[in-house]
Image: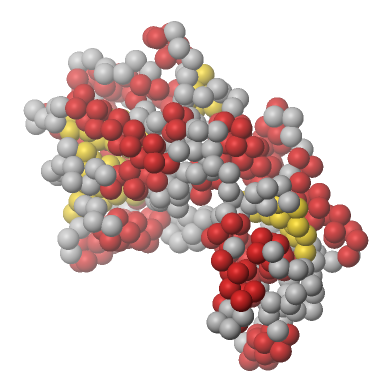
Amino acid sequence: MKYGFDNEKYLKIQSQHIKERIAQFGDKLYLEFGGKLFDDHHASRVLPGFQPDSKLKMLMQLKDDAEIVMVISAEDIDRNKVRGDLGITYDKDVLRLRNEFMQRGLYVSSVVITHFNGQASAIAYRERLERMGGINVYYHYLIEGYPHNVELIDSDEGFGKNDYVETTRPLVVITAPGPGSGKMAVCLSQLYNENKRGIKAGYAKFETFPIWSIPLKHPVNVAYEAATADLNDVNMIDPFHLEAYGKTTVNYNRDIEIFPVLNAIFEGIYGESPYKSPTDMGVNMAGFCISDDDVCSEASKQEIIRRYYNALNLMGEGRDNVHEVKKIALLMRQMKLTTVYRKPTVVAKERAELDQEPCAAIELADGTLISAGTSDLMGPSAAIILNAIKHLAGIDHDVKLIPQEMIEPIMRLKTSFLHGHNPRLHSDEVLVALAVVSQHDENCRKALDCLPLLDGCQVHATVKLSEVDRKMFQRLGCGLSFDPVVE
């Protein structure tokens, strides 16, 4: 992989900047964490060198001063809202995230159930958490007219009605399974209630994208718009920052639209607002850690096209996401991109037309393009991985790494005993077989050792891939796209 992002620098300056923001407010800082604390694969794709768990590593540097408060909306509990990337409900993800944090030595102090209006499912969830022991659970209520009814919000019938969340450390990280959980409202409610208790507390926001310190139409920022096309987020120049400081910075529409309201809430709590713009509220330093702009720009262009294919596939599955497809298509036009720019798509389609079978292609870090077709033994996903690592290991293409007599019993197991319809081996099955053979075969060992070199490579398939194969490419760090199929 060609690196364009200095991850070590990021960990150092990001944690230092947060420490400075804590000191700015005195006693306590409520830090709203947007996006994913770990498994941030979007960031690692558009900023090659950014580690998916970078935010978590950064937080680990502050763990003695930090505690985590998990937030979940009662409305999301009630409708069993599911995380699309993991396929689990938000209420289960709160427990998963809590366990992940605690296993790393981070202190998770409590769970806040927001938008509470007496929902029976939320009450049952609170009781379940409390039975588990060691979990403090609080309710934050629906406030009529939030966020615009500032007079009610800044009162004992607004924020004052919410449970006061007991915290003990100077940095309180507010995080949630996904957007719309009410993280910001929890932060603001705590500021109100801390102020009533004579505790000086501040608020800041930590979101990686859009990156405020690079141009509005930089490919990295445009890739963020593509990633959030379903939410209709729009990157914008922060007008408040421009007016206050005469400097051009980038933010997104929701933060800019809500800032006058936040400003009024801050004034209601403190008497004056500590911030002059939405950009002021942020603490993200990622833009200062881009070490190779060309590498990040190229990776982001690939991500924009990849997102376009993803949206087309969702539409093919029957999703009502025409707006999402059209928006990403418009972003591509603005960036002067077409699907042809993504070289593996061209190679895969050319091979598919020639073979009249589903095919795949991969672009390696040095620009080498390799293709693979479908055989009786394996599909294009497994074949392209084998072809790529053979090339990287310097093994002749005609060399068969896995003996056919080993593959055939696996195929028979899948169809005769496990009642599968597709006898061909998936990518995970091929790699397990390769690992077994590698015990006594030097070529297999050399090929397996090359798997890490697939990190950052771009892959395209002319057929909808199975979930198993999709997850395998994600684990390998490949940017994957495939042709849409109408179901």
Question: Residue at left 56%, top 66%?
Answer: 449
Question: Residue at left 33%, top 43%?
Answer: 58
**Is 152 on the left-hand or right-hand side of 238?**
left
Question: Residue at left 60%, top 25%?
Answer: 217
Question: Residue 405 appears at what percent x and percent y?
Answer: 71, 89
**Is 167 on the left-hand or right-hand side of 326?**
left
Q: Quadrant of residue 431?
A: bottom right
- Tell me which colouring the rendered structure shows: secondary structure
- Which residue is more in the foreground, 286 or 437? 437
Question: Residue at left 71%, top 34%?
Answer: 332
Check the image and report above or below for 335 versus 324: above
Quarter of the figure that contains the C terminus? bottom right
**Is 460 on the left-hand or right-hand side of 53?**
right
**Is 377 on the left-hand or right-hand side of 169?**
right
Question: Residue 282 appears at what percent x and percent y?
Answer: 37, 28
Check the image and report above or below for 110 versus 24: below
- Which residue is more in the foreground, 271 or 238? 238
Question: Residue 406 appears at what percent x and percent y?
Answer: 67, 87
Question: Residue 251 appears at what percent x and percent y?
Answer: 47, 25
Number of residue marks: 0
Q: Quadrant of residue 423?
A: bottom right
